[in-house]
Amino acid sequence: MDLYSVLSPVGLNNIDNQNCFPFLDDDYGQRIDVDRHTDLISIWKAMELHVDAGLAKSIGLANFNTKQIKLIIKNARIQPANLQVSKFGY
């Protein structure tokens, strides 16, 4: 593939083996259950392996903030080829 991107800088916790977005019900209603311990560096290292294996020509990021981008750049062997920013309707 030409470009393989990390869509989001956070993971989602699995609740009751839900297949889509795991929601928590709380005093504010439903909200997505975000995994705040997502290891962005490990994810990026795995993406680099896809380039090494010839499965992706380039790799990139989507919806990362400045601090997260700098973390990846500091630890990357292969620099991100792009940054996509999506407008979410939340």
Image (spheres, rainbow, N blue to C red):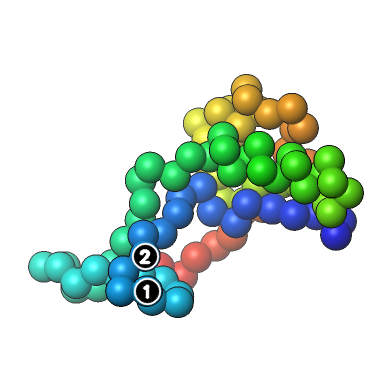
Do residues under tags 1 and 2 come within 8 Å of each other at their CB atoms? yes
Amino acid under disc 2 = Asn
Is 4 in front, or is 43? Answer: 43
Is residue 55 visible from the viewing direction of this image? yes
Q: Tell me, for residue 14, which label it has, or none.
A: 2
Q: Is residue 4 left or right of residue 6?
A: right
Figure quadrant of residue 48: top right
Percent x, y for residue 20?
A: 45, 75
Residue at the spot 63% in from the left edge and 25% down from the top edge: 75
Q: Looking at the picture, does residue 75 appear above or below residue 26? A: above
Is 77 in front, or is 68? Answer: 77
Percent x, y for residue 80?
A: 73, 38
Residue lying farthest to the top in this orientation: 74
Q: Is residue 76 left or right of residue 56?
A: left
Q: How many marks?
A: 2
Q: Secondary structure at mark 1?
A: loop
Q: Is residue 40 left or right of residue 4?
A: left
What residue is pinned by disc 1?
17
Q: Looking at the picture, does residue 50 appear above or below residue 69? A: below
